[in-house]
Image (cartoon, rainbow, N blue to C red):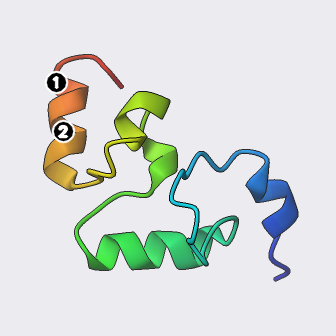
Amino acid sequence: MDCKKEKNLDKCNCTYQPCSRKGVCCDCLTYHLKNRELPACCFTKDAEKTYNRSFEHFTELVSKHRI
């Protein structure tokens, strides 16, 4: 399977500039799940800027209808 990194970058909302996983969704997802987090693409633009990608933060945002 070929990586669609260039196409994925069009939709990637990660604001962490030195991230080596940008556009490589399989690596990004693996990294974040290992750390009990979700990747930036699961969050709104404002929520992503906090860099709090924890499961708990995500569920809080969902419960408040912000996602």
**Residue 31: x percent and y percent?**
41, 78
Please rate how many residues cluster around mark 2, counting C-alpha atoms within 10 Å: few if below 14, some from 14 to 19, many from 20: few
| Quadrant holding the C terminus | top left
Quarter of the figure with residue 65: top left
How many numbered callouts?
A: 2
Q: Residue at x 57, y 71 (%)?
A: 18
Please rate how many residues cluster around mark 1, counting C-alpha atoms within 10 Å: few if below 14, some from 14 to 19, many from 20: few
Farthest residue, direction top? 65
18 and 37: which is toward the camera: 18
Name the amino acid type tagged 1.
Ser
Name the amino acid type tagged 2.
Thr
| Quadrant holding the N terminus | bottom right
**Residue 19: x percent and y percent?**
56, 71
Q: Residue at x 61, y 67 (%)?
A: 25
Give the numbered dot on residue 6. none
Q: Which residue is mark 2?
A: 59
Q: Residue at x 56, y 79 (%)?
A: 27
CA gap, disc 2 to disc 1?
A: 6 Å
Give the numbered dot on residue 63. 1
Farthest residue, direction front? 17
**Residue 21: x percent and y percent?**
60, 74
Can you say whether 67 is above or below 42 in the image?
above
Can you say whether 9 is above or below 46 in the image?
below
**Residue 36: x percent and y percent?**
22, 68
Can you say whether 21 is above or below 62 in the image?
below
Q: Residue at x 30, y 79 (%)?
A: 34
The answer to whether the residues at label 2 and label 1 have Cβ atoms under 8 Å apart is yes
Q: Secondary structure at mark 2?
A: helix
Q: Secondary structure at mark 1?
A: helix
Quarter of the figure with residue 62: top left
* Relative to 31, 2 lies left or right: right
